[in-house]
Amino acid sequence: MRGDAEAHRMVAPGTLASVLELIAGEPGEWTPIAGGTELMVAHAAGRLPSSKLVSLWGIPELRFIDTRPERLAIGAGSTFTDLRANLRLTNDFSLLARAAAWIGSIANQSRATIGGNLVNGSPAADSSPALLVYDAELELISVRGTRRIAYTDFHTGYKKNVLAPDELLFAIHLPRRFDKHRQYLRKVGTRRAMAISKVALGGTALIESGTVSEVRIAAASVTAFPKRLYGTEDALCGEPIDSGTIAAARAALIAEIVPIDDIRSTSEYRRRVAVNLLQEFLTDLQPSEACR
Amino acid sequence: MSQTWPAIRMTVNGVESALSIPPMKRLLDVLREDLGLTGTKEGCGEGECGSCTVRINGELANSCLVPVLQVEGARIETVEGLSRKGEMHPLQQAFLSCGGAQCGICTPGMLMAATHLLQHNPHPTMAQIREGLSGNLCRCTGFIRIFESVIAATAQTDQVTDAR
Amino acid sequence: MSTAATTRIVGASVPRKEGVDKLLGRARYLDDLEFEGMWHGATVRSTIPRGNIRELHFDPCIEWSELAVVTTFDIPGKNHIQLIVNDQPCLADGCVNHCDEAIVLLAHHDKRKLREALDAVRVEYDLLPPVFTIEESEQRDVIVWGEDNLLKSYLLEKGDVDSVWSRAAYIVEREYRTGAQEHLYIENNGAIAEYNAETGVTVWGSLQCPFYVQKSLMAVFGLPENKVRVIQTETGGAFGGKEDYPSMICAHAALLAMKSGHPVKLAYDRMEDLAATTKRHPSRTRHRTALDADGKLLAMDIDLATDGGAYATLSPTVLSRATLHSPGPYACPNVRVHSRAWATNTVPYGAFRGFGAPQTIFAIERHIDEIAATIGMDPVELRRRNFLHTGDTTATEQLMREPLILDQLLDRALAESDYHARRFRFSQENAATAVKRGLGIAAFYHGSGFTGSGERYLNSLAGIDVTPEGKVRVLVSSTEFGQGTNTILAQIVAEAIGVDCDDVIMAPPDTSAVPNSGPTVASRTSMVVGRILQRAAAQLIQMLQNQAGLPQPFTREGFFATCARYRAAHGKPISLCRYEAPPDIFWDDQTYRGEAYGAYSWCVQIAQVAVDTITYSAEVEEFWSVQEVGRVLNPVLAGGQIEGGIAQGIGYALYEKVVWQDGHMANNQMTNYIMPTAEDVPPIHSFIEEIPFAYGAFGAKGLGELPHDGPAPAILNAIRDATGVGFTAIPLLPEDIFEKLAEPVEERAMV
């Protein structure tokens, strides 16, 4: 344990309003900590710079899963165990439920929050590809009120996002219009459990009259931050899924991803596997495909 | 530095405590140092090995990743709470008969994870057992006899009353 | 009296002796212990792989008088860790030869102040060019150790290898490589020490060999045996990683205790343990093999190199075992093994389950499959044609006298795995699926106990005594760290005397309380130490018969009553015996000829592996292991050792990679050093054959290391079967499989 517990102040005001007031009063001074599964690792390594932390853990206004006819609203403080336990979510947003099951271990899932996963903003974030292909919308909150942005606009760089210094992520909204879409999500890690993503690919696609009328594709660990792969989508949108389209989509994917070499994997491997995952997704969309 | 911190109240294995400790002290260190409950172990400090696994309000958690302020008012269970008056819990008995513990350092965390699994799912499939224990690393057993221990314990789950 | 056929306790799955404490969370490991007035220790370590220490800077912002600071000047005796070659300093003396080498020690009663102080020591170096690989070392452009970087070499010769090449029908040459492997015991290294000017040093530690540590501390402190006391604490896994390293950490803790005047706990966190302590030796094995037209081996020319790291430590003995296991379980009239251990500027490598055998067994068992593919023969058939049989001689000209049943082991493994039918099915299915499946075999032996004359040299002493409370105590320095020492030895003694297992307890693993029964290594505990205890029990009974009227036959109650009578007349009943070598064990250390090991255990393993051509991941789907181990003393414990060894072997093959960056372990966190989880281990089917060994306890031979020897080659042979590609290096990660399996990706970015 290389961190110094006494070097960090931590408060838990207990309500959303009081947290917002606190961070509005001293913008940028307080680091929000939810489940701690990221920040406490840094703390143990002696690498937690934040001297003032405000706990979001268990604040009821942040921890909810709310089903409406047109959307599902997930409080940012919901843990991945909460997500997996919600029947509506697992039925209607199976990719997100699957991603929730990938997070660490059962113990990690009970503490890691979806809000923490997004705000931490790792390019390998487990929940990001699913949220991107489900057209998630984020609701941000401060003393000044709330605002909504498309999740695709949330990350602006490596571990950078649009949150103002006095803002928190409040909720993730998932529009309920993917029940006719084909859905795909696959993660490639170093082992079957407790693995940071080396590559992951998510996709949703609506096929009408043999052509792709809607498609959303996102990947993990191949760009500096989680983002939609618009180039690849453009190669597919409005096209029939045939060998020409697949080739064009593969080329587009290669052109727009920037995988790196790091301690876990190589750029060559990531590039190749990302293409393979895309191929797997698209092959499954082909009309004459027999059962897999 | 002699500071005083506001007391943090928690119930551990049914016993209430109020401790004046820094809010960012890890729950793991509070259990081991302030409460003398050394059954919960530190293997990695990163939430990877699971040897620090405890239950907080009925949920499984890696106590090395929990700042103690966040367990204010919580009900915590550690391995020491599994047995009653020195009598082993059926799961512990199963581990003994089936060889689920070798060096024993992963065992407390493994038992907490297995207890949690069986409380939610008294008759888990092998896949569910593997998933339930996927956060607890064991370097000695290769897991096989841990799985057998859990399966042996499921035969006795009907007899276990969870009064906690 | 028990015979091999009719034992009550030996052969039963007696519950683990210390199991209840472990399960209740009551067992106290090193970091669970707190001593009155205890301080904490920390180590300032080198940040460069090689260089001279120009100066040490202690930042004046710290109140240094509050701390205990230990440098080389504080070492009362010799600044080295006594092992084989005394080249490893206890603290770096003017120069460093690897990253994370210990330079300065600090202690303080407050952990937070200690951490501040640790960050406030700066070392100034004059850099020297480092050597990081076997190739760089053997080139000898830069000399980093001794005259020529060579830590040790052996030459083993049988027959005349060079006379064969011209008449061989086939010659097959390949090179195989294995990487470093970390033990990853879940409990990190740790020690607590006390120092007293009159009574000397006392150390508690998570360790395998209390007397190794005692010997090292005697040298560091210049103290006699009776002033150095070493006590093993409950140890959370070891696997060889706590065989020699504890001498270092215990010396450090003791020096801090001496300097500070307080007990000092020095316990590593995971990052430090991964970076700074021993790992398995990396290796490179070159095989050149000649066969006749029928696929019979004519000659094996083997060039073996290991990377020993910056200091010799155990490299000579690891190299020895690697050498002796390199020809595999095959009869071959002409063999040459030239082996060398090279020094590099990396953290010194050390003992790890298998101790050189996993490295060379990987090579030979992969090579057999490569030969089979090259000459167009089934790898099963090739093995059958060349297996050792009773009456054959090994590469060291050891006559195999004991029954040798490799054929039966192979037959059983093939039958249990339904090998031929499965392989046929996969050959049909693979073309149509993204996942390719295959099966692979490994056949191997593991020499039990120390090599050749090693056991004679150890001259182990062990025995039993009886307490006034009516307990039989086992007196050994053999330690428990999960493998079952406490239970097995108690079973042996209980059986040998004729009392209950609960009547037998272990004397504390404390050098002041037990004799030196040798280190807890080399799969020798059951076979060698157990055998000494069996004899000590017989000796005790003889003594009680002669001197206290023990009746024949006697009951358990009669035994204890007689002990009480003996105690009244003569004092404590105690019986100690020394190791007795089996007859006809002759080993020549110079020529490397003779009986390399007193006994061998044998094994055939089969792995079923699935290779996903979308992700290039290989996973073991199922695993079979058939082993002949003399006698199983406790089926549950034996099964646990087999399964655990196989799981570690799977990690060695497919998951565990040490990533070096300029001589420092860059992935020194559990997040990035990958071992298999509960979701990764396959179902493991294990089968025992027993041919009792006359000189092992109740017929037992070694078991603990054997299962780790085979998985890596079996798995890579299965991958060859599945994909047609013969990989020759481990760890074999998806990134490596991808390189050989994937077609080049089309159109790169035209940016």
Image (cartoon, coloured by chain):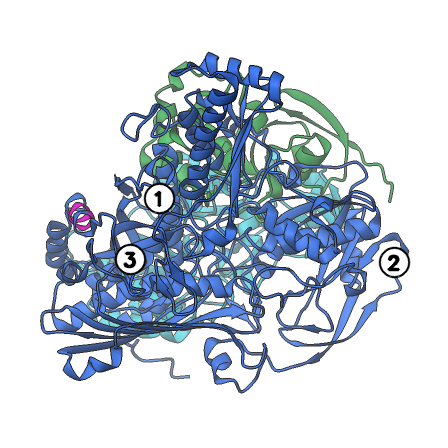
Chain colours: A cyan, B green, C blue
Quarter residue C711 falls in = bottom left
Give the class, few, some or many, for how many residues have Cα within 10 Å of label 3's Cα (few <14, many ≥20): many
Closer to the camera in the image, C14 or C564? C564
Which residue has dot 2 on it?
Answer: C64
First of labels 3, 2 by sequence position: 2
**Which class describes the residues within 10 Å of circle 1: few (<14), some (14-19), or many (20+)?**
many
User: Please, is residue C748 above or below residue C87 in the view?
Assistant: below
Q: Is residue B59 left or right of residue B24?
A: left
Of badges 1 and 3, the one in the foreground is: 1
Nearest the eye: C348 or C117: C348
Q: Give the alpha-carbon distance from disc 1 to disc 3, as whole Å.
A: 26 Å
Frontmost of labels 2 and 1 is: 1
Q: Using the image, name the chain to which the residue with label 2 belongs.
A: C
Query: Which amino acid is tagged 1?
Result: Lys
Q: Is residue A147 above or below residue C501?
A: below
Q: Are marks 1 and 3 on the same chain?
A: yes
Query: What's the mark number on residue C701?
Result: 1
Please tell me the numbered disc located at residue C618.
none
Q: Amino acid at mark 3?
A: Ile
Residue C197 placed where, x, y %? Answer: 83, 46
Judging from the image, what secondary structure is the residue with disc 2 in? helix
**C464 relative to C202 in the view: left or right:** left
Q: Residue at x 29, y 78 (%)?
A: C746
Identify the main secondary structure in magenta: helix
Q: Position of residue B20 (x, y in %)?
A: 79, 32
Q: Amino acid at mark 2?
A: Trp
Give the Cα distance between marks 2 and 1: 55 Å
Q: Which mark is residue C715?
A: 3
At 71% across and 38% down in the image, what residue appears? Answer: A12
